[in-house]
């Protein structure tokens, strides 16, 4: 899928790098991962808006003639607003990317106490 197939939607649905309307959504704050806005894929379906339905979605227009493969691929997955982020493994991945909250006198990247003991 090319970037041309994704049309971003300028609708902010996040606060402080999290999705407050989703009770179990992880926080991306401090991970270096920026929340991405919803987008419209090449089929005209809105992905990542948390409404989970779109007028053009094959799910809304399903019939015996619908090939389920039409909904396969990355264009159906939002990079930061996806149910997969709620899994234990992915939440741990995000936590591992956050800098530790250290005492006020610690340097974020250099061990300033090295050799003092």
Image (cartoon, rainbow, N blue to C red):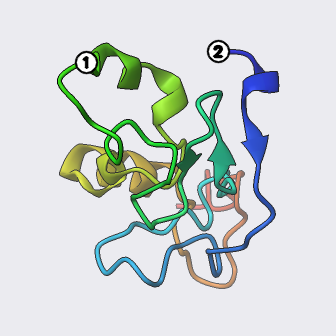
Q: Residues within 10 Å of mark 2 (few under 14, many from 20)?
A: few
Of the 4 image quadrants, the one containing the N terminus is top right
Q: Earlier in the sequence, mark 2 or mark 1?
A: 2
Q: Residue 60: x, y in percent?
A: 35, 48
Residue visible at 72% across and 33% down? 6
Tell me: 18 left or right of 91. right
Q: Marks 2 and 1: which is nearer the front? A: 1
Residue visible at 66% across and 43% down? 40
* SS at mark 2 in the image: loop
Residue visible at 44% across and 19% down? 73
Q: Residue 50: x, y in percent?
A: 46, 66
Tag 1 residue = 65
* SS at mark 1 in the image: loop
Nearest to the observer: residue 95 or residue 22:
22
Residue visible at 25% across and 18% down? 65
Tag 2 residue = 1
Question: Relative to 3, is 49 above or below?
Answer: below
Kindly report the distance in space between the C-alpha atoms of the residues bearing marks 2 and 1: 24 Å
Q: Residues within 10 Å of mark 1 (few under 14, many from 20)?
A: few
Q: Residue 9: x, y in percent?
A: 76, 56
Question: Relative to 57, is 75 above or below?
Answer: above
Nearest to the observer: residue 86 or residue 115:
86
Quadrant of residue 24 in the image? bottom left
Quadrant of residue 69 in the image? top left
Q: Residue 66: x, y in percent?
A: 28, 22
């Amino acid at each position: 899928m090319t970037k041309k197939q994704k049309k971003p939607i300028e609708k902010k649905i996040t606060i402080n790098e999290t999705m407050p309307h989703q009770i179990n959504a992880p926080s991306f704050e401090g991970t270096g991962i920026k929340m991405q806005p919803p987008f419209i894929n090449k089929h005209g379906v809105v992905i990542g808006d948390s409404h989970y339905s779109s007028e053009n979605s094959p799910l809304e227009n399903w019939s015996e003639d619908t090939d389920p493969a039409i909904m396969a691929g990355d264009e159906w997955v939002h990079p930061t607003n996806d149910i997969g982020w709620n899994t234990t493994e992915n939440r741990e991945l995000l936590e591992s990317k956050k800098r530790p909250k250290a005492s006020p006198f610690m340097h974020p990247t250099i061990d300033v106490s090295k050799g003092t003991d």
